[in-house]
Image (tube, rainbow, N blue to C red):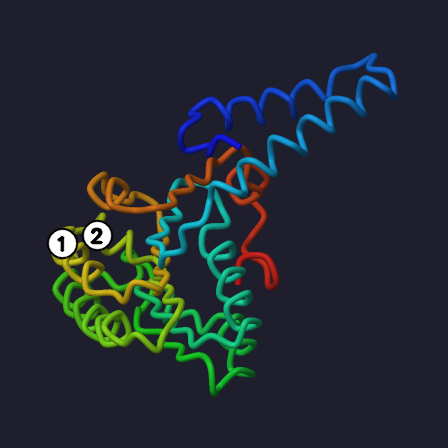
Amino acid sequence: MTPSSDRPDIDATAATLTEQSTQVGLTAEQYKRKMERRKAVQTERLAARTLEKGLIIVHTGNGKGKTTAALGMVLRSLGHGYQVAIIQFIKGAWEPAEKAVFEKWPDQLDFHALGEGFTWETQDRDRDIAKANAAWEIALTYIRNPAYRTILLDEVNIALKHGFLSSDQVLAGLAEKAPDTHIILTGRGAPQDLIDQADLVTEMSLVKHPFREQGVKAQPGIEF
């Protein structure tokens, strides 16, 4: 079997077969043949992907769900029995419901809500810079500790966007992580140099939002 690393078209082939399987008018036999081929291609793809490594993961964009998606990864890590740390750079003043839930894993999870709220609430740039840097120093203690498998730096991209932290500062810290440690950085406005360094980048796109279009306020269970 030819490794898919030597066949750059294998991923495109998988996507094409998946798209073809949704065509209207396929007979049962045609659909079966396409799915047989799709399974063979997927087996080939999986056989070639043998590398394991700790990932730098970025969730950015103007759409809702960046932190929520990251917390799903946190939950998975806890389910595997891993040590996890969450450092919140902006939302700390909220005391979010997630914190109450995750306190049920006191032996696996360290949760630091170190922000004081959104920049328009704090209205003190010097204090925001000081708080962000204090949070970053705490984050570094976890990044440098190989016992922690997953580390969530929530809204750190906002701190970068506003200049509370520098990209060089954060990238240098990320370079100190253990080989198996996953680090998730959330928040809109992720700088390009961070995106370039990351292994996995997801941009949440805003299509509709009830706050903007319907005047619906933030609600428990959805926003906090």
Taking depth in this image into account, of 39 and 179 the one nearest to the observer is 39
Whole-percent x and y of residue 212? Answer: 51, 40
Whole-percent x and y of residue 191? Answer: 23, 43
* Pointer 1 with pointer 2, Cβ within 8 A: yes
Q: Which residue is disc 2 drawn over? A: 160
Instruction: Determine the secondary structure under disc 2.
Output: helix
Q: Residue at x 46, y 35 (%)?
A: 205
Q: Residue at x 26, y 64 (%)?
A: 122
Instruction: Determine the secondary structure under disc 1.
Output: loop
**Residue density around tag 2, few if under 14, some if 14–19, many if 20 or more, within 10 Å:** many
Q: Residue at x 45, y 51 (%)?
A: 66
Q: Is residue 206 left or right of residue 30?
A: left
- Reading the chain from its start, which is encountered first: label 1 or label 2? 2
Residue 26: mark = none
Badge 2 amino acid: Leu
Q: Residue at x 35, y 59 (%)?
A: 54
